[in-house]
Image (spheres, rainbow, N blue to C red):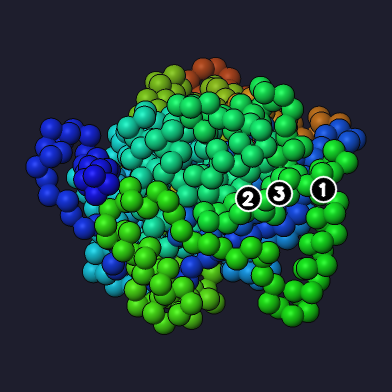
Amino acid sequence: MASSSSNIHENILFQSRSSDVKLQIVPVQQKKLNHVTRREKVGLSFSNLSFTVKQGKQDKVILKDVSGRIRPGELTAIMGPSGAGKSTLLNILTGYKTEGTRGEIMMNDRVRNLSKFRKLSAYIMQDNQLHGNLTVNEAMNVASKLKIGNKSAKDRETIIAEILDTLGLLDHRTTMTSGLSGGQKKRLSIALELVSNPPIMFFDEPTSGLDSSSCFQCISLLKTLAAGGRTIICTIHQPSARLFEMFDHLYTLADGQCVYQGSTTRLVEFLGRLGLQCPPYHNPASYIIEVACGEYGNHTRTLVNAIKNGKEDIQNGQPLPTLEITDGLNNSEKFTHDIKNTIAAAVNKSDYKFENEPVYKSTTISALPKDVVDDIAKGDAAKDDPEKASANSALLGGPTEETATKRYGTSELDQFFIILKRTLLFSRRDWTLMYLRFFAHILVGFLIGALYWQIGNDGNKVLSNLGFLFFNMLFLMYTSMTITILSFPLEMPVLLKEHFNRWYSLRSYYLAITVSDMPFQTIFCIVYVAIVYLMTAQPLEIFRFGMFLSACLLVSFVAQSVGLVVGAAMNVQNGVFLAPVMSVPFLLFSGFFVSFDAIPIYLRWITYLSYIRYGFEGTALATYGFDRAKLQCFVSYCHFKSPQITLEELDMINSSYLVDAVALVAIFFVLRIAAYLFLKWKLKTNR
Ligand SMILES: Nc1ncnc2c1ncn2[C@@H]1O[C@H](COP(=O)(O)OP(=O)(O)OP(=O)(O)O)[C@@H](O)[C@H]1O
């Protein structure tokens, strides 16, 4: 009976939704990850973990001295009412949150080295964070090149096929990520991380937004991953009874304290001992949440004391803890004292072990496919024998030299090229980023060309021509800046996830995105400048055109850098408002509205910061400088017939094009470095 149910589960798990009808006739295939890199098993324990945030002048304690233990080969659920601290605990365990945290986190019974831990773990966040403009295959290729770039292309291909097959995504290889269903996106997020076969995986609400069937598929998948020897931890709100029984281990929080830790099958018994009888046919998962919410009276302290705030771990076959009579307060102070002594002894001896050694057994094991059960059994049997273990399990095996020493799966130079290629690929597919921008440049180019038609050599229309030069700056500034402000913050969540999961360094990423848009921006700018330059009849001399174009290009690159700084420092809403507002002084002090001499001395410094001024001056010098011959005059008197007079009026007679160009290059570099620093800061503070 159990075996047939497991077959059905497996079928449901690995068939696409559209092929439900074939469910009964497709033979069950053994789906195992045989080619992924073998990694060591990771067990995690924590003791007296507290998390405090500042709220105004006061400290708010969110986690209160909780302890716990999470074993490899088990699927662990962190449950609790809303606001109990589930996400906070998960974020601390992943290493995503470090500030404001107190307490010990141990990895395989040794004090955790966060850097080493991050190499072994993967954090799959709630909102999937995928690039919509890549196909499943492309996304997998990028992940594999970044994470296991040392393997041959053929090996990577095999691993990708194996993972996609196992996760039921093989038929969707060519589907765009944006076209996947919620459950498929979740599976793709898992597949991307599975490439490097992390022994410990964290999931923040993996079932949120999924229908009940997809929830079941998702949890079944996590169960299968756990059965392979991995440590799987996820937060979950309130699973159905069917989902709940798939978890091996339950960690329940209420008001920042642990109210239950142990096997899911012992929960009802544990609560019963404390006089909290779960009604028959009532979902135990709902019942513990109701108890934690205080629907049956305030039992939080009793539960916290009974489970010793997570120090007790109720496993199958282990006696339930006896309820200690206390003064009614939780025992955390006593525990803190105890554990500090234990840790101090451990640091001296380096052999710290948790109170209760794990009893590694799952009562829901019969719900799993047979090969998975075999794996668990082998893992169990080989537990005390590392050699046996590495031979038997898909996951086991000590860390290789590589995983032990290298921070990333590939060199930073390779990372740069892989990210560059990926960015170019989805830029090419991004309608707004590419085609709309291209059409906007052409359209505005022709409009401006028509408006200022053939005025460039007319001595009577010099002021209008200066207006044209200024408008060029305005247009190039806004288009380059706003597109970056709009698109860059959208990248942030993906960057946060990938960078946290050690796909690449921030340096490689930043360099790649810095370089990636330049070719497109250059082409758009050349097309625009060529159109307006010819239509407005500016001097037809190659060197003047070259200088004019260079000044325009530099201004658009600088404006793009401003967009990057704003995009890195704030969200889209604030950026879209603030960036244009902040640009106003630069426009005012560009030299077009007020000449330099007319500006009050105490405000002149702003002109030195105005990149628009350097751009405007550069194009004006390219147009009227370098001994340009007198303009034509079609009326009786043209005041600006001589280009010299125009430059004198603009206070540019002694200006140097070279100085303008160097200033623009310098501002460009300063802004790019500033954007990098903002990004670095944001990656830190966003956690
Ligand atoms: N940075 C912070 N500043 C202030 N309060 C915070 C901060 N982070 C978390 N909290 C508070 O801590 C409590 C626990 O938050 P957490 O997100 O961990 O809860 P949760 O159990 O995951 O809730 P939910 O199920 O609703 O997501 C909440 O009351 C939350 O408002």
**Residue position marked by numbered label 2 in the rendering:** 320
Q: Residues within 10 Å of mark 1 (few under 14, many from 20)?
A: some
Determine whether, in the image, residue 98 is placed left or right of residue 530: right
Residue 545 horizontal/vertical position (percent): 45, 44
Of pointers 1 and 3, the one earlier in the residue sequence: 3
Q: Residues within 10 Å of mark 3 (few under 14, many from 20)?
A: few
Which residue: 39% across, 76% down? Answer: 390
**Residue position marked by numbered label 3 in the rendering:** 322
Residue at disc 2, secondary structure? loop
Which residue: 40% across, 21% down? Answer: 447
**Residue 62 visible in the snapshot:** yes
Residue 464 horizontal/vertical position (percent): 55, 22
Quarter placement of the N terminus: top left
Up-down: is 637 above or below 30? above
- In the image shown, does 75 or 532 lie closer to the viewer? 75
| Ligand 1 under 8 Å from disc 3 Cβ | no
Residue type highlighted by circle 2: Leu
Residue at disc 1, secondary structure? loop
